Image (cartoon, rainbow, N blue to C red):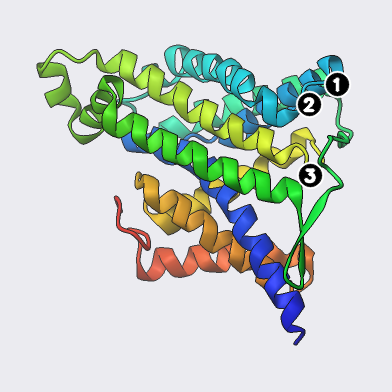
Amino acid sequence: MDSALALQLLIQGILLGGVYGLIALGLSLIFGVMGVINFAHGQIMVMGMYASYWIFVLLGIDPYVSLVAVAAIIFVLGYAIQYLVVNRILDYPEAMQVLPLVSTGLILENIALLLWGPDHRSPQTALGLDSIWMGPVMVDTSRVIAFSLAILITGLIFLFLKKTTMGKRIRAASDNRTGAVLVGINVDRINNFSFGLGAATTAAAGCLLVPIMPISPYIAHDFTTAAFIVVILGGMGNLPGAMAGGLVLGVAESLSTLVLPATLKQVVSFTLLIIIILFRPQGLFGGKK
């Protein structure tokens, strides 16, 4: 086995795993507050990717620069989905919560198809072809930036939840919804904000992926699946676990290409998922079963 190749794949897996963790962070946040699994998560991320792409095409603004604006736009989209759809199904049985969110995802996917078509789009950003050397390993600059920003955004989300008044209200609503209502917290507003924040987080991850991979409406399902696997690996509702689970999945997928074709990397992902569900359903880092 080529040790340099293995090291390069390990580094690439860690860098991609950081973005996986950021994608899953939004899903875990939504589940942790409301106990709802957002089956439209990947489609929301793709809408963020397309927003970033068109800002780049029309205005020439790099996806790393437009990240904040795109996150704000998708925050509004997430807030609207929560207000119009999710608030009305929170008390439904879990099986009945699935269809409205799957339908929302399909609507978003078809809106993307209508506006941008099915073709893959791959913008040539300023740093898209740059690379840096880490000893004997060459790594794309875009992946290093994406990983660094993913860690930074994750840290800011944790600080927001720990230090701000709104963050404390979100944590209170997550811990005990009835108790939060009794102390005067508007839980419906907290739910709307939390869904919007989760959507904005995954949109930010989408912006980080724009320079790395082609955009298509059909990639949403793959990222929804990846987010589910990461959240289950880390523990449902466990935010630090989401980042750790992302790193585990990224490394596992990357190193698997040493022995398997790259097209079979999802075999590794789903194998990990089955093992975790069978032997540690609460996830590697605790969380809700």
Of labels 1 and 3, earlier in sequence is 1
- The correct choice, above or below, for 244 with respect to 219 in the image is below
Q: Which mark is residue 57?
A: 1
Badge 1: few (under 14), some or many (20 or more) residues near its Cα, within 10 Å? Answer: some
Based on the displayed image, in which of its 4 quarters is residue 172 positioned? top left
Rounded to the nearest whole Å, what is the CA distance between mark 1 and mark 2?
A: 6 Å
- The correct choice, above or below, for 102 with respect to 131 in the image is above
Tag 2 secondary structure? helix
Of labels 2 and 3, earlier in sequence is 2
| Residue displayed at 69% across by 31% down | 64
Comparing 27 with 213, the one in front is: 213
Is residue 267 in view from this perspective?
no
Badge 2: few (under 14), some or many (20 or more) residues near its Cα, within 10 Å? Answer: many
Would you say the residues marked 2 and 3 are in contact, meaning their CB atoms lie under 8 Å apart? no
Q: Where is residue 7 in the image (x, y as percent from the top left)?
A: 68, 74
Q: Residue 213 carries which label?
A: 3
State which quarter of the image contains the C terminus. Answer: bottom left
Rounded to the nearest whole Å, what is the CA distance between mark 2 and mark 3?
A: 12 Å
Query: According to the image, label 2 marks what residue?
Result: 53
Q: Position of residue 240 (x, y in %)?
A: 38, 49
Based on the displayed image, in which of its 4 quarters is residue 180 positioned? top left
| Three-letter amino acid code of the residue under disc 2 | Tyr
Would you say the residues marked 1 and 2 are in contact, meaning their CB atoms lie under 8 Å apart? yes
| Three-letter amino acid code of the residue under disc 1 | Val
Q: Position of residue 85 (x, y in %)?
A: 46, 17
| Three-letter amino acid code of the residue under disc 3 | Met
- The correct choice, above or below, for 236 with respect to 57 in the image is below
Tag 3 secondary structure? loop
